[in-house]
Amino acid sequence: MTQDDPLLTVENLHTSFHTDDGTVNAVDGVDFTVRRGETVCLVGESGSGKTVACESITQLFKRPPGEITAGSIVFDGIELTNCSERELTDIRGARISHVFQNPQNALNPVYTIGWQLLEAIELHQDVSRAAARAEAVELLDRVGISEASDRLEAYPHELSGGMKQRVMIAMALACQPDLLIADEPTTALDVTIQAQILRLLKDLQAEYGIGILFVTHDLGVVAEIADRVVVLYAGKVMERGTVYDVFETPCHPYTRALLDCLPGRGSLGGIPGSLPDPMAPPAGCRFHDRCPDAVPDCSTGDQPAFESVVGEDHEVSCLHYRTAAEPTVLESGVEPRRPSERTDGGDTHD
Ligand SMILES: Nc1ncnc2c1ncn2[C@@H]1O[C@H](COP(=O)(O)OP(=O)(O)O)[C@@H](O)[C@H]1O
Ligand code: SF4
Ligand SMILES: [Mg+2]
């Protein structure tokens, strides 16, 4: 393990839920990495597998029905899929922190904020009560909570949604994690608070050098916070690359459709159609029944293999980018918009 190795490497991850109605392959062969000090965003519509991918890292879901059926998750040299529950509990909180979408469920209503923060600090650091209290005040202050020492006495219900989310972030940072996994942490908040929290995360990241895996369905948020982007659809990665490449030269029709949904980009009301049945995903490319560029070959075989496109580690899973595209695809009459051929500029850094 060298300093240059990714902090987190997820390879060929398959996570399923065995239900009475059948098996849901929620994450179906997903790869991504997170380096120290960078923010990687998982993006995709609701139901694409973002939360399950995050929960797989420290196996937060109930097992059964959930199960990692294949793949590897290496965190700082440790293969997490081989860890016992006890080892995972030690890593969770101590080295990998989670911030969830709904702080309501993550804070205990019967204890004060201070009690919960001190508990998190004392669990992971060998410090005196007074030092832990001073750190709790400092953390609340860092996450932008005014009159922090008074707030320690508050119960969760006495705080606004934005405040509770800040407390959650303070608790997630209390153990000084190497990796912060934030699953739609700002979705329930108004845009002003959301912007403050995104800035706060970037500031704290710059200060502590933590890696952040950030989940959102909102590409506007991605533009604010991401270094690299992984676009998920129906449990599979469609495209990945730096935020610059993916926004400037989106290659996958699904990525382009998501970008078209940004305010001012023309597509109101979302992408027509819906995700396939997770218990019976279609053959071929998972996006084919919603794809404006689909050709007959798109609905046979497997999800297209990744192809490199212009940019650093920029890859796309779409038949139109196959380096050795077969005649049926090339003669189909569909004009794939390869990065070099795009004319609309795709400037979405707004
Ligand atoms: N506990 C569960 N049991 C059965 N299916 C689940 C469970 N959790 C998630 N799923 C399914 O896995 C898929 C991915 O869900 P999720 O990761 O929550 O999507 P996202 O976070 O992208 O909105 C969905 O089809 C969802 O219904
Ligand atoms: S492989 Fe076919 S269906 Fe899938 S994104 Fe490309 S053109 Fe569309
Ligand atoms: Mg989710």
Image: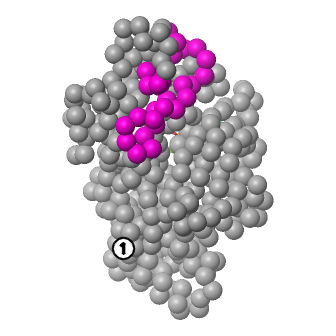
User: Image quadrant for the N terminus?
Assistant: bottom right
Helix, strand or loop at mark 1: loop
- Asked whether residue 217 is drawn in magenta, I would say no
Residue at 63% across / 86% down in the picture? 126
| Callout 1: CB less than 8 Å from ligand 3 | no
Q: Is residue 173 left or right of residue 150?
A: right
Q: Residue at x 42, y 12 (%)?
A: 330
Number of callouts in the render? 1
Q: Position of residue 49 (x, y in %)?
A: 56, 39
Q: Which residues are magenta?
A: 296-323
Residue at image point 52% right, 32% down: 306
Q: Residue at x 36, y 8 (%)?
A: 333
Q: Which residue is mark 1?
A: 145
Q: In this orientation, which residue lies closer to the viewer: 116 or 250? A: 250
Would you identify the image quadrant in which residue 206 lies?
A: bottom left
Res. 187 visible in picture:
no
Which residue reaches farthest front? 324
Q: Is residue 210 above or below residue 301?
A: below
Q: Amino acid at mark 1?
A: Ile
Q: Is residue 195 above or below residue 327?
A: below
Q: Position of residue 272 (x, y in %)?
A: 39, 21
Q: How dense is the environment of label 1, judged by Cα within 10 Å: few (below 14), some, or many (20 and up)?
A: some
Q: Quadrant of residue 334?
A: top left
